[in-house]
Image: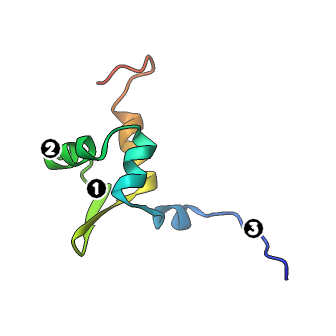
Amino acid sequence: MTYHNRDRTSADDELYLLTTLEAAELLRVKRKTLYQHVARGDYEGACKKQGKHLVFHRRRLLKLVDHSFDRKGKKR
């Protein structure tokens, strides 16, 4: 049986959720640091509670991080 890769649409990407461990690895921070950022409201709109767990919308998270740094890599 052959499986065909189909192109991911923006709707598919929007539904792509990350665990706290995956989000921390993506952002290259410790999980503890990620939780501190969430508590400060840094990722508002990019994370939500799913039961007792936090999950992150991958695309929204990357967009927030991208907008928080200038072209030279310095935090705005």
Image point (45%, 21%), residue name: 71
Q: Position of residue 30 (x, y in %)?
A: 31, 41
Image point (31%, 24%), residue name: 75
Discs 2, 3 touching: Cβ within 8 Å: no
45 sits to left or right of 69? left
Image point (43%, 45%), residue name: 25
Q: Position of residue 18 (x, y in %)?
A: 42, 59
The earlier-in-sequence mark between 3 and 1 is: 3
The mark found on residue 45 in the picture is 1
The type of residue carrying mark 2 is: Arg
Q: Quadrant of residue 40?
A: top left
Check disc 1 and report its element: helix, strand or loop: loop
Q: Residue furthest left?
A: 40
How far is disc 3 from disc 1 in space, using C-alphas?
A: 30 Å
Check disc 2 and report its element: helix, strand or loop: helix
The mark found on residue 7 in the picture is none
Q: Position of residue 4 (x, y in %)?
A: 79, 72
Check disc 3 and report its element: helix, strand or loop: loop
Image point (22%, 49%), residue name: 35
How far is disc 2 from disc 3 in space, using C-alphas?
A: 39 Å
Q: Quadrant of residue 46?
A: bottom left
Q: Residue furthest top?
A: 72
The type of residue carrying mark 1 is: Gly
Q: Quadrant of residue 47?
A: bottom left
Q: Nearer the viewer, mark 3 or mark 1?
A: 3
Give the residue pinned by disc 3.
5
How far is disc 1 from disc 2 in space, using C-alphas?
A: 13 Å
The earlier-in-sequence mark between 1 and 2 is: 2
Give the residue pinned by disc 2.
40
52 sits to left or right of 61? left
The type of residue carrying mark 3 is: Asn
Q: Position of residue 43 (x, y in %)?
A: 27, 48
